Image (spheres, coloured by chain):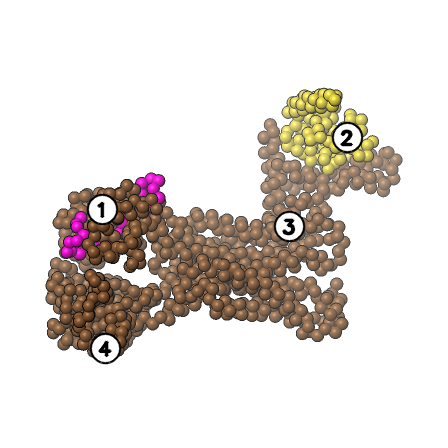
Amino acid sequence: MNSEPTTLLQGTLDLLILKSLVAGEMHGLGISRRIQLITSGTFHVKPGSLFPALHRMEEEGWISSFWGDSENNRRAKFYRLTKPGRKQLEAETKRWGRISWAIGQALETS
Amino acid sequence: MPLFMRARSFLRSLFSSHRVEADLDQEIRSHLEMLIEENIRQGMSADEAQRAARIELGGIEQVKEQVREQRVGNWLHSVLSDCHFAFRQLRKSPAFAAVAILTLALGIGANTAIFSLVNSVLFRPLPYHAPEQLVWASDFMPRQQNSILLESDFYAWRAQNHVFTEMSAYEPDDTFTLTGAGEPQRLRAARTTFSFLDVLGIAPQLGRTFREEEDRLGAPGVALVSDKLWREHFASNSSIIGQSIQLDSQLYTIIGVLPATFEFLDNSPADVITPFALENREIGEQKAMHIVRIVGRLRPGITPSLAAADLDAINQRLFAAYPPAFAHMFQGAKAEIIPLRERLLGKSRPALLTLFGAVGFVLLIACANIASLQLARAVSREKEIAIRSSLGAGKWRVLRQLLTENILLAFAGGCCGLLLSAWLTRILVKLSPSDVPHLALARLDLRVLCFTLAATSFAGLLFGLAPAFAALRPNLVDTLKESGAQSGAGRFAPGSQRLLVVAEFAAALILLTGSALLLKSFHRLASIPPGFEASGVFTARIPLPRNLYPSHELQAAFFQRLIEQVTTIPGVTSAAAASILPLQGSNGSTSVEIEGRPPELPGRAPAAEEVLISPDYFQALHIPLLSGTVFDPHNAQNGANLLVVNQAFVQRFFPDQDPIGRRVVLGKEEGWTIIGVVADTRQFGLAAPVTPSVFVSFAKKMFPEMTIPELTLLLRTNGNPESLLSPVRSTVSTLDKNIPIYDVLTLQDLLHDQTASQRFSSLLLSAFAFLAILLACLGIYGVTVYSVSQRTREFGLRMALGAVPRNISFLILRQAALLTLLGMVVGIAASLALGKLISSLLFHVEPSDPATFFTVSLLLPAIILLACYVPARRASRVDPIVALRYE
């Protein structure tokens, strides 16, 4: 695990959260661990960034929440992707693809 | 739907905030517990697992705060909670809140009250169409220091100018007696040329305005009546157009009713307007020439200076054709164009703006006071703020909280101030001099409310920002570590507080100096002897209708009978009549030549004021006879040309000679013998110089066409002069029921009016200065008390080491004296700089009057040091043991 995690680009966190929720509904810690997993440990999302983002995205309507039981039978708040959330994920993925392609191009040109 | 979700979230965080909060709390807590479980699963001990989880989470409260800031309703919610918290904070220190709100209420209340005066007088739009194009025009004559325009020149200007769309001549202050229906009534009247209402851009609410052919000598009489007269006398009857009314026993046809909002020019009300009927005559003709006032509407784009240049070009031609006497009088005369607004309001502006500025200083002092109190509180609140910061409150959040508290305070003060101002405005209107136009209309309107809102917000920001920034010190850890409230105090507060005290003190000094100068000039003015004894004299004007009393003989006989009759009213000790009262200006002047002397200036004899009087005039007014004799019923009527003159007349014409028995030529009438000399009275007002005057008996017919259509009755009584009104009224109507009496006032009122505006501004400025000193005293008292409480331990130590109480008091007073001295230097410098601004309000006092400055700079420090004496004494009584154990 990276002790000094890479700083997240503006907007990247939303994309990562949306992406991780594609696998199914998850609570905060689950999302955090899932992001760590799918980025091979590059991004470690701390609660101080995660929760504000989750609440903001819920207000945007991209995700919805409900209370449920965790794997250890602990009450936890779960989040799931909504329809607008899926659309947003598509749009964000496209956008990100363009950006990363462009940046890659820029860096390859010497 | 995002919008719907957002709205729902907003409403949720507003109305079910505690459920949302509980939800959030549980979410974070369960997250923490899951983290701990995860750590334990990875093989950590329970303690280790908890610690690692906490480190990763980074503080429950901080995370919650970060989430809250993301919410849509967060902004409003936090403002509400700020307000709630601020309210609790203020309730926790009621003494502070009360002092602050009271101080602000006084400051804002006084400001709002003065602003509503300024608003109603200076900011009020003139009730005419496009008033910025309206100007007043005249010829300024440098020789006479006077502006007049001759009627023939009005015609030339009107015909030949290129700068006015139209101009009209007018004459205010005329009067008519309305008869034929009920009691005879004296009406204020004005005369104007036919296009007057067109120039002002006003249409009558009923009927029409004058036609050109009605504005000629000999045309049948027509009249416009005011809305007030129409309502009061004609019961708002719309059929009065075309009806006739009897004015001075002549018939006039009413052709129109003026709108209710109409105001005649020059602050002179008019119930009736009749055509001027001027004549376009050659200036050399042997007939009296009207002097007229002109109002004109400038063509678009024409400035007053361009207009003056155009009229001056016309004047060049006019003056060249003047006969020698006129040419001499008008030598160097220039056309003078004054914007109408300036003419109507210019005189009241300096006094009102001075008061407005002064009351602004009061508000600044009030703000400085509260800021200084807040600084003192900020020191003791350092810990609270540090705790809030460590719990996740951002810098701006803390700043906003402190500002909210101050703005809440400001608004509480503003509301109280508004209430106070409603009351103050009423009092000010009552106290105000009558010569300020529209002042009586001062009231709270939207503009005043906006002003109050602006002043309140400004005040809140002003005294809120300094302490808020001071409180936002970066170093949390030091603050939390510090042991007592005392240790952190030394860094910012006293410095800023001292600065505020110096500023307050300087502002108070400026106000005190200003009010002292005004008071001195008021005293100078009020202590000028008017030359007569004002108390106990009743006056009223008695006009005689021209058709009933067409000749001097009839008029004189009526007045003589009237004087005989009113003498018998119980309480009347002497009765007299005169063509004009002292202080009221001129009723006409006459040229004077001394028989046996060559004329002083060829073709231009010096002039003296001419006053027609009854024999007992000097006795009724207690004007002392200096030599010779005055009129008596015998010599007043026997046909001899007798004259009483005043002392100024003697100084002017007989500086080293005995004037008694000398003969003079008055106008064209020869053979007037001086029989007596009386002391001077102020004819043109207290502030104006005494002019040479001649007194002639009204019973004496000076020249063949002479008439006396009106005299003022003067009754001296040993009782209350106001009680004479009804007996005088009944005496007059017994003699002739067609004769009204008007302008009833006591001579004391007349004298009082002379100093009214000086009294008003000096009284108000003194009140503001008093308020300012009170606030400044409170300010320096607060700072001293505070610094004493900060230094208790030091004083204890000093006393333990052998200092006596006197040393301690000295220490404190020395600090106060230093601040005082600094404030004084700044204040005196500023007063000297600002003095020019009030010089137009001063009478015979220099704005840099040394005596005033000397007194003020002794008085204010004495008051301030007295305010510091109490805390200084208390400090000197500190018990060293108690003080050292204090911590």
Q: Which mark is residue A43?
A: 2
CA distance for labels 4 and 1: 49 Å
Of badges 4 and 1, the one in the foreground is 4
Which residue is identified by label 4? B658
Of badges 2 and 1, the one in the foreground is 1
Q: Which mark is residue B377?
A: none
CA distance for labels 4 and 3: 82 Å
Amino acid type, label 1: Ala
Classed neighbour count for the residue bearing mark 3: other residues with Cα under 10 Å, few (<14), some (14–19), many (≥20): some
**Residue B558 falls in which quadrant of the image?**
bottom left
Labels 2 and 1 within one chain: no
What colour is chain B? brown
SS of the residue under disc 3: helix
Of badges 4 and 3, the one in the foreground is 4
Classed neighbour count for the residue bearing mark 1: other residues with Cα under 10 Å, few (<14), some (14–19), many (≥20): some
Amino acid type, label 4: Asp
CA distance for labels 1 and 3: 69 Å
Which residue is identified by label 1? B156
> Disc 3 vs disc 2: Cβ atoms closer than 8 Å?
no
Amino acid type, label 3: Phe
Q: Name the residue rendered at 44%, 62% in the picture.
A: B764
* Main secondary structure found in the magenta portion: loop
CA distance for labels 3 and 2: 38 Å
Residue B777 seen: yes
SS of the residue under disc 1: helix
CA distance for labels 2 and 1: 94 Å
Q: Name the residue rendered at 30%, 42% in the picture.
A: B163
What colour is chain A? yellow
Magenta stretch? B280-304
